Each structure stands twice: as C-alpha cells, then as structure tokens.
Amino acid sequence: MIYYTSIKTQIGNLGLIRNDDYLLKIYLPNKEISKQILQQIYPNENIVENKSGFNDVVNQLTEYFAGKRKRFTIKTKIQLSPFYKKTLTEVAKVPYGETVSYSQIAQKLNSPKAARAVGSANARNPLPIIIPCHRIIANNGKLGGYAGGLKIKKYLLKFEKENLNTH
C-alpha cells in the first residue's frame, strides 16, 4: 500500500509519499502528485490519499519551517544505487545552515573525481529537505542546481542561516 498527502509550507505544497513503514519520497512544489502519477511509479501497489499516517513527518517538517528543527528523525527508505545511497548518507551529515561543495562530498566518499556523480545523486534525492541536498553547492560558491529550482534553494539556505541560533 502506498499513501500520499501534501503539506503547505513557505516554499509551496510538498507532496509526501509513504508505505506502511517508511517515508519514501517528498515532492517539491514544482512537481505534481496525483493518484494517476503515483500508479505509474508504483504499478503493483494500491495508492491511497490519506493524511493520518503522516503525523510525525508533518510535525517535523512544520518544526523545520518554523526554524525549530535542525535534524530529522523520520524512518525513511531510499531505493537507489549503492553509490547514490552512500552519497546521500554523506549529504545528510551536512550541518544545518552550512554548505559544502559537490567536490567535498566526493572527497569524503574517497572518489575525488566524482563531483558530477555527487550532483547526479543529489538530483535523484527522493527526500529533499530531510536529506538536505540544498546545502550542496559548486566549488566556486555558486549554487549549482536544485530539483525544486534555484529560488527555493536560495530560500532554504537563507532561511537556515537566519534560524541557525534558534531552538
């Protein structure tokens, strides 16, 4: 069974997808979710719109957007290649309000030439915000890309810097 709902935030509506045990995906505001779209992604699953199982996720995202939550404790499941999973595990360690470069993540993975692959992993990040790929920037300090668009990436980085010292 696959469940979905949406939550209104400062950056727009986020689409949330879960199964019985894990949060599987967050859709940023520029991506539409519907039962028909999800049925194509999960062809062998029953798709149900249902807010009730998302309470913990909604609470944690609401706290984040209120500047009160710096880390997430949501049970998630990532279905990507081992390299992409490893990359996103490293991305998840980037502290709130800070940025690191694609190259720095590649170095941490002992793959110093893999900066582009790190970018590709970020582009496929199924859990933006929870896995903070918006905190990854280019070596020259430019923002690089973001699945939600650069306007949202800029907003999230500025928002985190402004809320760095709040509890």
Image (cartoon, rainbow, N blue to C red):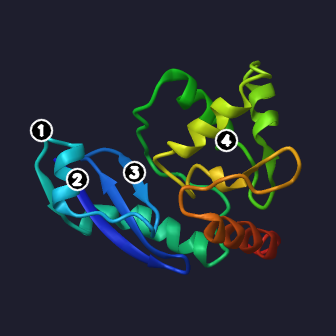
Residue position marked by numbered label 1 in the rendering: 44
Q: Secondary structure at mark 2?
A: helix
Mark sitting earlier along the chain (1/4): 1
Residue position marked by numbered label 4 in the rendering: 91
Asked if the residue under mark 4 is in contact with the one under mark 1, i.e. CB atoms within 8 Å, the reply is no
Tell which of 19 and 157 is nearer to you.
Answer: 157
The circle on residue 25 is 3
The amino acid marked with disc number 2 is Leu
* Neighbour tally class for label 2: few under 14, some 14-19, many 20 plus, Cα within 10 Å: some
Q: Secondary structure at mark 4?
A: helix
**Residue 36 placement: quadrant:** bottom left
- Kindly report the distance in space between the C-alpha atoms of the residues bearing marks 4 and 3: 16 Å
Q: Residue at x 43, y 62 (%)?
A: 57
Mark sitting earlier along the chain (4/2): 2
x, y percentage for residue 63?
Answer: 57, 72
Residue position marked by numbered label 2 in the rendering: 38
The amino acid marked with disc number 3 is Lys
Question: Marks 3 and 2: which is nearer the front?
Answer: 2
The amino acid marked with disc number 4 is Val
